[in-house]
Amino acid sequence: MTPSVRKLDWDSNFFGFATAQASCSSGSPEEIRQIVSWCEENSIRCLYLLVDAAASSTVRAAELEGGHLADIRITLARPAEPGTAQPVEIRVATGEDVSALKRIAAVSHTDSRFYHDPGFPRELCDNLYETWIERSVTSDFAQIVFVAEVRSKAAGYISCHVDSRGARIGLLAVDKKARGQGIARGLVQHALSYFASHSCSQIEVVTQGRNLDAQRLYLKAGFIPKSVELWYHKWFGLEDRSS
């Protein structure tokens, strides 16, 4: 078994077909070939391959093996220092917020790679983020989720994670009807204060290369780019899903 590739049980069950993930910071063409062979031997339908954007030989190998570019993954980081208070009403999310947050989630994450790969049905992509925010509030997907309110109604959310991988922002979204009021900025600043109060040294956040609004938001909040990686999707046993 190739150690750098693993089957994703949760994704496989959710989408209804076998998926796997591999990361290659500087993998050789032969290593990419081994990953692809492992997927073929294990009846994988879709491989998510994460490649360092600066590793040109690995990028070429991923493309030669039939991977298509699904996303540009940008990781940003900043020191964990208290945020600046914003004129936004923010509180901890509870189970009573789930329905409202799911409605926001279903239409707010369309810059993600799944929406830009026709192999993933649009309705399942919507449901993916509905499930993600629900589990972030009700289980262990996140340490805490904060909700912004406008006129006593949930208008946005941000999830915060602190674990062995460090401190990071997960999902962030604002209801379309409430945008332009500084809610996203307020949620980010509130999250910064949360991380600082939990003795974190650095905070990371990941966004998409196509999501310019998110990049601007985080840069204004003091984050700086840390790494740029490329997500390739390779489909097996199907015609090319990139068209």
Image: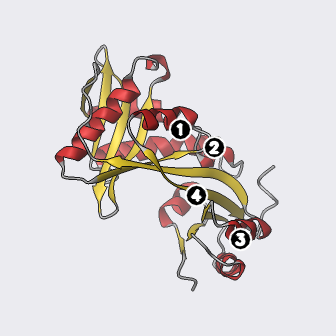
Q: Position of residue 151 (x, y in %)?
A: 31, 13
| Residue that sits furthest to the top in the current view | 151
Q: Earlier in the sequence, mark 4 or mark 2?
A: 2
The residue where tag 2 is placed is 115
Q: Which dot, 4 or 1, sits closer to the camera?
A: 4
Compute the Cα span from label 3 to label 4.
Answer: 14 Å
Name which residue lies at 69% across and 49% down.
117
Q: Earlier in the sequence, mark 4 or mark 1?
A: 1
Q: Is disc 4 surrounded by few (<14), some (14 to 19) or many (20+) residues within 10 Å?
A: many
Q: Earlier in the sequence, mark 3 or mark 1?
A: 3
**What is the secondary structure assignment of the residue under circle 3?**
helix
Compute the Cα span from label 2 to label 3.
Answer: 27 Å
**What is the secondary structure assignment of the residue under circle 2?**
helix
Q: Which dot, 4 or 2, sits closer to the camera?
A: 4
Compute the Cα span from label 2 to label 1.
Answer: 8 Å
Q: Earlier in the sequence, mark 2 or mark 1?
A: 1
Relative to 5, is 150 on the left or the right? Answer: left
Compute the Cα span from label 4 to label 1.
Answer: 19 Å
Compute the Cα span from label 3 to label 1.
Answer: 31 Å
Q: Nearer the viewer, residue 198 or 107?
A: 198
**What is the secondary structure assignment of the residue under circle 4?**
strand
The residue where tag 1 is placed is 109
Q: Position of residue 167 (x, y in %)?
A: 31, 53
The residue where tag 3 is placed is 57
Q: Is disc 3 surrounded by few (<14), some (14 to 19) or many (20+) residues within 10 Å?
A: some
Compute the Cα span from label 4 to label 2.
Answer: 18 Å
Name which residue lies at 24% across and 53% down.
200
**Disc 4 residue type (three-letter):** Glu
